[in-house]
Amino acid sequence: MAGTSTTARHVAVLGGGICGLATAHRLTRSGHRVTLLEGSAQLGGLGTYFPWRDGWVERFYHCVMPSDDELLGLLAELGLADEVRWRRTDMGMIVDGEHHAFNTARDLLRFTPLGLPDRLRFGVVSLLLRRLGRGKDLDNTRTEDWLRGLYGNAVWETLLAPMFGSKFGRSFGDVPALYLWQRLGRDGNVATRGYPARGYKSVIDGLRAALEAGGARVRTSAPVQRLSVVDGSARITLPDKEMVEADQVVSTLPLPRLRQLADDDLATRLPTGRLPYQGVVNALFFLRRPLAGHYWTPVVRSGTEFDGVVEMSALAGTAPYGGRHLAYAMRYTDRESALYQEDDDRIAARWTAQLRTLYSGLSLTADDIDEVHVFKAPFVEPVYPLGYLRQRPPIELPGTPLLLATTAHVYPEVTSWNSSVRLANQVAATIDGAAVSRRTASAMRADGEPSP
Ligand SMILES: Cc1cc2nc3c(=O)[nH]c(=O)nc-3n(C[C@H](O)[C@H](O)[C@H](O)COP(=O)(O)OP(=O)(O)OC[C@H]3O[C@@H](n4cnc5c(N)ncnc54)[C@H](O)[C@@H]3O)c2cc1C
């Protein structure tokens, strides 16, 4: 262990999603005393799972990309990197109820929702897009302005706004173009994607085991109710007036949640900008047969409330799902929206009917749909305003023992397990760096050097 009595601190990590788990892991390995507090009964945050038959299934679709270096590095440390199964996946597109493959130059030439000149323009601009963005101030450029200018109106309206915009709803055109430019570096139409052979639960379990083996305390069903700072230390209130004291706190909770917990003094020190967040409504279908076999299919103007379908079995196969084919349908939306507030059973019934109509060409019958489960998450990703690079909240809150590590901090990277692990590494390095400075100062004092 790298820590010593003068450097090791008691750090409380709030939130047991991937960011909290990875932060706690890094800090434990540096020798700090770590307590991880997760409010729900399960670790994993947006990567959580539910029991299904004799196994577990993720509530929300997840995959690993080959460019996820930070996540793959963590998996290697946990001895799990070899468990990631890589598979080439492709993409479909449904526009006005018509199904299209959307992967090769030939698919594009046959893509009738666009006229031929626009198909060609789409192909050429897409090839050059990464290069066209280099050196531009895309953080201050609206996505719509940038993309309409490059691709023209038809491509923007028919394809790009619905394809990439579903995550941000109507605000997508206003989000900085930098976000999309960065995202194109991670995603592709035909892409090799990875999935842990024993599911994301194996990663979460691996992190928990490593934490506990390193001496960290991992607590679930421990919702933080209040956070205050007293004499430079943090005081965390849990249910039944239980109090946890810590030298430092890393909060991975969405900022609106943290704001509700901070005491009045701390609240005045939190970042002031109030970012709107998108949540998600997502339905899982266990099917007796595959749909079209595309991993991802955006759905445009086709009479559905969901904006896309992810066929997980195109990546993970059917073995994890007892021979069933798993498909997720999703709609990113504000947590106050009527859809988000609606009863899950009603959503399940309506979306089942919509899925059957959407895939009526495949004669999808009621019997083909074995089970439907609806899951929601209120905070997935902030809707970034223009110029967000300068407005991004700081990680360290001056004058407090609090550090922030949230999805609002990873921009311009796409929120993902990879960007959360990168952020966790950065936060842990910040705490370690401060610890080294304290050790140096204390050594200098012991040597009789003037202290600062
Ligand atoms: C539909 C969907 C699909 C996605 N697909 C992918 C993908 O394919 N690949 C990928 O890499 N990423 C994907 N992501 C994104 C990824 O899941 C997130 O970026 C990542 O999980 C964020 O992790 P986090 O730890 O920052 O936040 P979270 O996972 O939100 O964790 C925050 C934790 O804080 C806890 N908490 C909240 N309040 C309290 C409290 N008062 N006290 C204690 N704990 C509290 C919550 O219960 C939660 O566990 C997807 C997300 C969604 C929703």
Image (spheres, grey):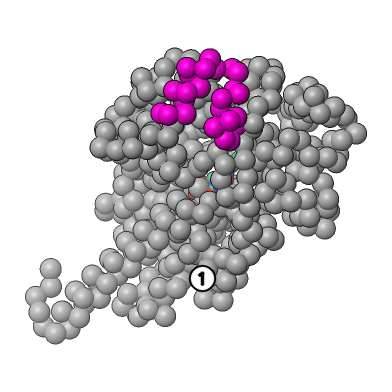
- Residue 387 visible in the current orientation: no
Q: Residue sitting at 69 percent across and 61 percent down?
A: 198
> Which residue is nearer to you in this view: 178 or 281?
178
Q: Is mark 1 within 8 Å of ligand 1?
A: no
Q: Extreme right residue here? A: 367
Q: Which kind of residue does numbered mark 1 sit on?
A: Glu
Residue 25 percent location from the top left of the image: 49, 67
Q: Is residue 98 magenta?
A: no
- Residue 160 visible in the current orientation: yes
Q: Quadrant of the N terminus?
A: bottom left
Tell me which secondary structure the magenta stretch mostly adopts: helix
Is 28 placed above or below 285 here? Answer: below
Query: Is disc 1 placed on a helix, strand or loop?
Result: helix
> Which residue is nearer to you in this view: 186 or 74?
186
Q: Residue sitting at 29 percent across and 38 percent down?
A: 134
Residue 387 percent location from the top left of the image: 30, 32
Is 171 placed above or below 256 here? Answer: above
Q: Which residues are magenta?
A: 102-125
Q: Is residue 120 magenta?
A: yes
Q: Which residue is mark 1?
A: 77
Q: In the picture provided, is 94 more to the left or to the right than 8?
A: right
Q: In the picture provided, is 378 more to the left or to the right than 10?
A: right
Q: In the picture provided, is 162 more to the left or to the right than 413?
A: right
Q: Extreme left residue here? A: 450
Q: Residues within 10 Å of mark 1 (few under 14, many from 20)?
A: few
> Which residue is nearer to you in this view: 14 or 357?
357
